Structures are given as structure tokens and as C-alpha cells.
Image (cartoon, rainbow, N blue to C red):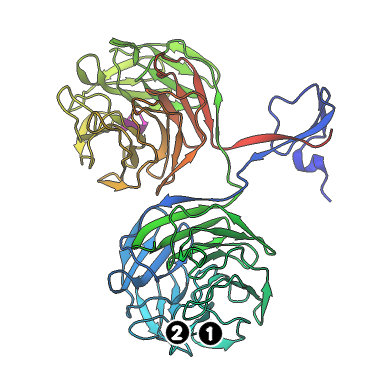
Amino acid sequence: MAEYKGIVGTKIRNYTTNPDNPIEGEVWYNETDNVLKYQHPNTTTSGSWSSGASINTARRTSAAFGTKEAALIAGGYATTLSGATETWNGTTWTEVNDLNTNRRAYSAGGTTTAGVTGGGYTTTKVAVTESWNGTNWTEVNDLSSARNDSAVGAGNFTATALLCITGTTPPGSAQAIVENWNGTNWTEVNDLNTARRSEAAAGTYTAALASGGGNAPSTAFYANVESWNGTNWTEVNDLNSSRMQVVGSGTQTSNIAYGGYDPSGSASTGKTEEWNGTNWTETSDLSQARRQHQGSGASATTAICISGYTDTENTAAVEEWTGSGAAIGAWSTGGNMNTGRRDMGGTGTTTATLGFGGETAPGSTTAVNELYNGTNWTEVNDLNQARRGLEGAGIATAALAFAGFEPPQTGKTESYNGTNWTELNDMNTARYNMGGTGATNTAAIAVSGATTTAIIANVETWNGTNWTEVADVNQGRIQLGAAGTSTSAVAFGGRYPVSSRVTSTEIWNGSNWTEVNNMNTARSVLGEAGTDNTSALAFGGTADPPIYGQTEEWNGASWVEVADMNTARSGIGSSGTVTAALAFSGDTAPGIQTSTEEWSGSTTVTKTLSS
């Protein structure tokens, strides 16, 4: 057995209080409190759903398989029976080749490059089976019995190992029939103990779970759960809520069942339950109650819920599940700036950031430049031109400052070499209060903003020498956030028209802007951090009033609210990434702050072991 020293690298030590920087998993003795303590990661205790990018065609009773990061949905009922197929790459849904037979309510399993479907309903129940090779669908050997409304949830089924569990056969009665697909043929195996349809499925063809469901017609709803060992089905503990048209994701010993048709309200439900191999526990509901939906996911900690029916209409909405154990981020206090201001430029990392320019009071612009070393701010050489509403790019020793309001608006560009600022070629369109970002001082992007007469949608990129006009954003605005690089960026929030704050989000791929899922909170003059169009952080800002402290994280598909700032503020200087960011100075109305906050995407907790 490994000893503590072998695991952590040191013996248990005594400290007067607590060590300054304990390592993860370290145990120590606190002599003041007379207790043993240790440090561990701070993680969530329950899972949650967040919005993802919608599919292109809203539908219900389709089939899906894959993972949270790479999934496929096919067929179903839109306004008519559909064979439409879409694939998901973790960011966007793309239409690909259709099924050969349009149908709904059938079994499926596999990956985005190799999958299989079986059964379903056209104008009658069918036994049709089709195989997917990543490009096309091909008809292969049929099921032994035609049926629809089989169990829903791809779990870990594959293109060569799939169970088609229960369903309804002509003329419409629920069955206990189970068939096993081996990549070539279907073979009947042992039946479930309880005949049913539209239950949740999860697991593999040798270790699966079937949960819930109902009879046909829908006069009974089940909470029954049965476990499959590759040979027989065994009844295990029931769901807490009886329902049918429910979906499952995960394994035989660890999965979630979500959504469905709830008999208690005769309506769709968003209920989510988590299975630990023995019992079901109710956890966070779907944001959008739905039934006849689809889902995929290999575990109880990562899944995706796709499309479905809301009792009034088909929905294209997608939600992504993150299980318990996710890292919890938090803001902590850093060193104060020497000169408080708002609407400044900033760039760098949490241990080497520049904050330059800005406004120290209404109408008083400044050229002051300060360097943060992770602890303290130090004044270094000023910008050549005082201004506010400017943006920055690069790192602390090779930075770029561009545009702003002197007054009037300017297109001036300055480059910093770690010591001095040098004026370079101006932008084509002078502006201020735009979004701006860039990984280096030779590659940056300026997004939208204002002139003295108008809000513009104009976008320019910098190549180290000149600015070039590129494709406009779809929605021109001012005081927006931007994060990423000159070839992969995300722009969010802001004001348009001047009196309105927006939640609009657009991503840049180096050629074009695409509108994606909106932020949760509309705001302007907010802080931003991030590395590309799949990873960004938005924090603070205002709707005039209120001033916000909310922080949201962008994952390439949706915004998720995380921990608030300690001090709500707008007009923030900012820098960093989604795991390590800085927010400095800014306006709390009525006062401008000098304080700095440091964001860590993962935090730790100190726990007492004895007393």
C-alpha cells in the first residue's frame, strides 16, 4: 500500500496555522486549532443543464447517438416525416446526407462516423435498418419484428453492438421483445420482465439499463427499471417519477434519465434523475420541459439533450449536461492600481498584464500605463496619446493599443516593446468603444464601435503593419466585449441602439461572423478574457442601472453563469483566459475603483479531519 509521503512527496507537517500554499491533497497539523486539515479541489455536488446550439430542423421522435462533443440526430417528425440528418462537432450542427427511409420513433447507436438505426414508423411500423459510415446511410438486414417506440438513449451502444429494446408491434401493443445487432444481423435475446415502450436506455449491449416507459395505448406509465447482464434482465430499484418518452445517457451503473411525459400533470417534464448503480436521485431539471426528444452521452457526467416536443410545438433547443464534480471558479482580491480609471485598454496574463489609457473622471482622459506582476501594479512608460474607449492585444512585453476617444475618436495605433510605445499606422476607420482582441501585437482584430455620428458594424484586422477591412459583424454595437485572436474570436454584449443593452453573441472564423447563442444577461462596458471563439469569459458591465458582477463562461456553444465578482463594476480593464483572468479598476457609480480581482477557474477547499 502506498504511503502518504509517496503520494504527496512530504511527511505530515506541523504549522502554527495553515501553510501559505498547500499542494492539492496535502495534510497538515494546525497547532493553533489542534486539528488535522487537508486541501482538496472545490467541485460541484450536483450536475446541471446549460443551453447549447440549436439544431437546424426542429423535430420530435427522431434518433440520436454519440457523445456530448460529437453527436448525430436523424429522422423524426418535423412538419412531416423526415430523414434529415445533422452532426454535432461540439460547436455547430451541420446538415449531412439523409436517411433512405423517412421515419420516426426508432432505435439507434454509434458514433458520428459509424452508426446504425433499426425499426420505426412511416405509415406503418417497419423493421428497416440502416448503417451510417460517416457520409451515407445504407440499408442493411432488417429487424426480426417491425416496431416503433423502442427504448430511447444511445448510451454506449455502437454500430456493431446495439440493443433494440421493446417497442410496439402491429396492431399497436407494447412488447417485451429485445433484439441484439452484431454488425450484420439482428438476433432475438431474452425479453424484459415488463412489456413497455418509450423507455430510457443506457449502457452497452452486454450491460444495459431500461428505465420507465409505458404501455400502448398510454393508459399506464412505469417507473420500473431493469438491468441487463448480456443474458437476462433483472428488476432493480425504480425511478422516483413514473414517465414515458424519457431519454437515458450513460452506463449500466452510472447514468441519467431526463425529460419525458409525466402522468401526474399529463404534460412534458424536465425532471432529471441520476442512477449510481443502486438508487435514483432527483437532480437539476432540464431548462425546457420536453418529451419525444433525443439524447446522447457516454456517462452520467456528460450528455446532450436534443430537440423534442414541448406540448405545444417541436423545439430545436439543445441542452448540455455537466455532472457533479465540475471545478468551481471564484474571484479573489489582487493588488490595487495606482491610478483608478474606467474604459481603459488591457492585455496580458494574471501575472503580467498592462492597463493603459482610460478616463479618470468624466471628460479627463489619461495616457497612464501600469504593469501588474501578479501582486502589485507599477507605473511604466505612458502611451503617446491619452484616450479612453480603446482596446489592447498581445502580451505585457509586446502589446498593441488601438483606437479610442481623445476627443475626438481616433484610429491611432501604438505598439509596446516592454519599455516604450511607438506610433504605427492608423486604422482605416477611427472609432471608440469597440471590441478588440489579439494574441500578439502583430495580429489583432477591432470589432464594431462608434464614430461621432453612428454605431458601425465595420471590422478591421491588424497584421503588424497595416489594418485591413474584413467582413462586418451582423449587429453593429458599442461597448461590447471581445475575446480570442484575429482568426478565431467571439464578440458579445454591448449596446444597440444606444439606449438598449443586448445579449447578442457572434463568432469569427477568420472569414465570417456567425450569430450563436446569446448571453444570459444583457450588458455593456463589460470585462472579457479568452483564447478563441470556443473559450471566453464575460464579467461585470452595466445596464445603466444596474451595475453587474455576474460572470458568464462561453464554451463554444452556450453561456453558463459562474461565480460573481466580489465588487460589481463596469468599464473594467481586463485580461487573461477562462481559467485565469484579471478584472481591474472600473466604475461602481458613483466612484471609480482601483481594486483588482483575480479569477481562477478552479479553486480549493480546506477541510478539517479531526477536532
Q: Amino acid at mark 2?
A: Arg
Quarter of the image where one finds residue 461: top left
At horizontal 22% and vertical 14% (from top left) the residue drawn is 407
Which element is circle 1 on?
A: strand
Principal secondary structure, stretch drawn in magenta? strand
Q: Closer to the observer: label 1 or label 2?
A: 1
Pointer 1 local density, CA inside 10 Å: few below 14, some 14–19, many at least 20: many
Q: What residue lies at 31% left-to-right and 60% top-to-bottom?
A: 56
Q: Which residue is mark 1?
A: 175
Q: Which mark is residue 436?
A: none
Is residue 26 visible to the viewer in this orientation of the structure?
A: yes
Q: Quadrant of residue 510?
A: top left
413 over 539 or under it: above or below: above
Indicate whether 365 appears above or below 218. Answer: above
Which residue in the protein does label 2 denote? 147
Mark 1 vs 2: CB contact within 8 A: yes
- Which segment did they paint magenta? 436-446
Q: Between residues 358 and 312, which one lies in front from this camera angle?
A: 312
Quadrant location of the C terminus in the rendered image: top right
Q: Nearer the viewer, residue 13 or 179?
A: 179
Q: Nearer the viewer, residue 359 or 216?
A: 216
